[in-house]
Image (cartoon, rainbow, N blue to C red):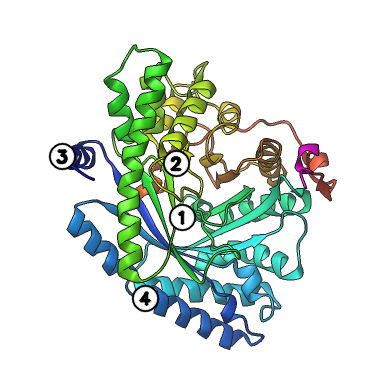
Amino acid sequence: MTNIWEVHETNKMIEQENLDVRTITLGISLMDCIDSDLERLNQKIYDKITATARNLVSVGAQIEQDYCIPIVNKRISVTPIALVGSAACHRKEDFVTVAKTLDAAAKEVGVNFIGGYSALVSKGMTRGDELLIRSIPEALKVTDLVCSSVNLGSTKTGINMDAVRLMGEMIKETAERTKEHDSMGCSKLVVFCNAPDDNPFMAGAFHGVTEADAIINVGVSGPGVVKTALSKVRGENFEVLCETIKKTAFKITRVGQLVAQEASRRLGIPFGIIDLSLAPTPAVGDSVAEILEEIGLEYAGAPGTTAALALLNDQVKKGGVMASSYVGGLSGAFIPVSEDQGMIDAVKAGALTLEKLEAMTCVCSVGLDMIAIPGDTSASSISGVIADEMAIGMVNQKTTAVRIIPVIGKGVGETAEFGGLLGYAPIMPVNASSCEAFIKRGGRIPAPIHSFKN
């Protein structure tokens, strides 16, 4: 039972501490749209999305008004398009027409983003998978709201190094095709190891084939709330610290649970999961890095950062699972650079490097996120960074990802501007040593021995 004190406390978190529901994401299966005729395929996809999501934005606005809870984004995720389009798409240009259809449907219903221009290739690539991947640079150039993701590895299957090499090339090509906007196309492109089927966050959201025909997933975020709570126990021991994070995460998740249940009821679509992720924004006081500083670090990246982030991630999950029966997605702490002012400050101060960020991804909920690098970084070096991150996910049985942006025409010390929730990022150096011979080997890195659990 909610009492008046809890209502006042929640209002304070919203008004003063940047608590928000980051997204209501409507997952839509497109499996029943599969057709061997490209024109019919596109029409079916458009009709299915616009019919299913026609009330998503208005319902989100009603919930915001009724409960005074900010809902930052309303989004759609769809079945990976490589699966849906393979019967009709025989050239990469055919897949681009599907991307345009997704974009048109998203604009028609008024959502912020649509995810699922995706392929799942952790063990191998079909011809359709490869065509979709090769179409990504053009698809992201000619659309505004489409987000793309590719799953390159898993704990069960290993890492598809052919796909890793190809994605290094596609990221570089995407950067080139959108160079007039600081290579912003790469901000809508992410690669995964162990990608979850129910992630509501972009750019990695897609509607997994194990999901129902339509589902509501909600992502909640509140770094500012956690930071404020920790400021009240400054200097206390780790037991007090952990209890404070856990209790705060519980409160944040309850807000998401309320919104998810209301959205599900009003739309008549089943509730899927709550993703409790401390996802920062460029707003002052809405930073995961500042939480780490409140725990006791001068900057994110200082000695002790990985331990502090591990503690934070674990306690967030412990608090969240007590507040909702269905916690899923990526739940934990995100560490994007461009979207977190504290991370940006740490990079500028020289405290945070790409190598330290990689170490932190061993314990965060995603991986290397929204990192701007020099535009002349080679495709093989980008693939090497991806391979490292995929290995962390594979061996540690966790989701890891890379969303990296080689900013064409800019170098270390300059800044890339993305705007809005994506913020801005200082260009970070990449190790100049070559890994080209390693990346060119091809084939697949086998799954680790602990993957055999049947």
Q: Give left or right: position of 332 versus 263.
A: right
- Choose between 246 and 284: the one closer to the eye: 246
Q: Considering only vertical position in the picture, is 398 above or below 166? A: above
Magenta stretch containing residue 25, yes or no? Answer: no
Image disc number at residue 321: 2
Under mark 2, the amino acid is Val
Magenta stretch bounds: 449-454
Q: Give left or right: position of 313 versus 367.
A: left
Mark 3 lies on residue: 8
Mark 1 lies on residue: 200
- Disc on the earlier residue, 4 or 3: 3
Image disc number at residue 14: none
- Disc on the earlier residue, 2 or 3: 3
What residue is rendered at 57% in x and 68% in y? 79
* SS category of the residue bearing label 1: loop
Residue 57 visible at all: yes
Frontmost of labels 2 and 3 is: 2
Q: Spatial distance from mark 2 to mark 1, Cα to Cα?
A: 17 Å
Frontmost of labels 3 and 1 is: 3
Frontmost of labels 1 and 4 is: 1
Q: Quadrant of the N terminus?
A: top left
Within 10 angstroms of label 1, few (less than 14), some, or many (20 or more) residues? many
Q: Spatial distance from mark 3 to mark 1, Cα to Cα?
A: 28 Å
* SS category of the residue bearing label 2: helix
Frontmost of labels 4 and 3 is: 3
Within 10 angstroms of label 3, few (less than 14), some, or many (20 or more) residues? few
- Disc on the earlier residue, 1 or 4: 4
